[in-house]
Each structure stands twice: as structure tokens, then as C-alpha cells.
Image (cartoon, rainbow, N blue to C red):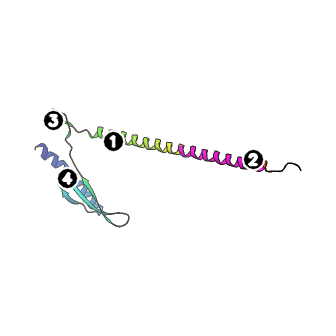
Amino acid sequence: MTKAQMENAIRNRYLDAIRDLLTSQGDEALTVSASELAIPCLDDDGNEAWAIVKVSIPRGTRNGEGGYTPYDGYAVAEDYAIDCAEKAQKKADAQAKKQAKIAKDEQKRAEKKALAEANKNLKELKNIPLGE
């Protein structure tokens, strides 16, 4: 069996497994290409939408010598997890920075309001006539 035939057999095995699972759950899975299934579904508003499931057998990355460095799904998954964690950290940092700015602005407004109130009270004190 050639490499391409082995890859096709693996791809078809997983496409069949996915199709069987979806069909057993009452969903429809339409074959739209040698490596894709289209699943009709409805969005929250009842409008038709489509989910596409693609099964591919990656070769890897070119190694510059006319060949490929084999694909390593474990390394790719680890890189993805690290990337997601970094994005989550950046988002948390941005949110914390935003909250700190909001708190700082609120503090400034409170100080400004207190100063205005103090000035108002001082004016009222100046306007009180002295014991006549």
C-alpha cells in the first residue's frame, strides 16, 4: 500500500466514524469532498447554518532539503495551549489595567467633587455676617 493510500484509508476511517456518530445522534452529515463533511444545523434564531468537519493528514513542514519534518501533533497542541494561555494572560492584564484606570479616574472625580464641596462650604462661611 502506498503512503497516499494509507493516508486515504486513515482519513476515510475517521470520516466514517464521525458520520456514524452524527447519524446515530439524528444529525445529517453530507460528504462534500474527499476530506469534508457538511452538517446542516440551525442557529439560535432558527436560521440554517452549516458546520464543516475536515479531516486531514498533515505531511509536516518543509525541511529545506526537499523533504518534510514530520508533523508532531503533541508539539502543536502544546504550542496552542501556550498561545492560548499567553492570550488569556494578555487579556487579563489589559482588563486589570482598565480596572486600575477606572479606579484612578473615579478617585480623581471623588477628589475633585470633595474639593468643589469644600470650596462651596468655604464660600458659605465667608458669607456669614460676623456678630453685628
Q: Amino acid at mark 3?
A: Gly
What numbered label is drawn on residue 80?
1
Q: Which numbered disc covers residue 22? A: none
Name the spot of residue 1 as percent of width and height, x first.
10, 44
> In percent of the image, x 13 and y 45: which residue is there?
4
Magenta segment range? 101-125
In the rendered image, residue 113 lying in the magenta stretch gets the answer yes
Depth check: give the residue in front, 5 or 118.
118
- Give the SS element for disc 2: helix
Q: Position of residue 95 (x, y in %)?
A: 48, 45
Residue at the limit of the structure toward the bottom, as seen here: 46
The residue singled out by tag 4 in the image is 35
Looking at marks 3 and 1 on the same chain, the residue that comes earlier in the sequence is marked by 3
Reading the image, the residue beneath label 2 is 122
Residue 44 found in image quarter: bottom left
Q: Residue at position x 43%, y 41% from top? A: 90
The kind of residue on which mark 2 rests is Leu
Q: Is there CB contact under 8 Å for labels 1 and 4?
A: no
Mark 2 touching mark 4, by CB under 8 A?
A: no
Badge 4: residue crowd in 10 Å (few <14, some 14–19, many ≥20): some
Q: Amino acid at mark 4?
A: Ser
- Depth check: give the residue in front, 42 or 89: 89
Q: CA distance from mark 3 to mark 1?
A: 25 Å
Mark 3 burial class by Cα count in 10 Å: few <14, some 14-19, many 20+: few
**Label 1 to label 4, Cα distance in Å?**
23 Å
Q: CA distance from mark 3 to mark 2?
A: 84 Å
Judged from the image, the secondary structure of the residue bearing numbered disc 1 is: helix
Q: The residue under label 1 is which amino acid type?
A: Tyr
Q: Which mark is residue 67?
A: 3
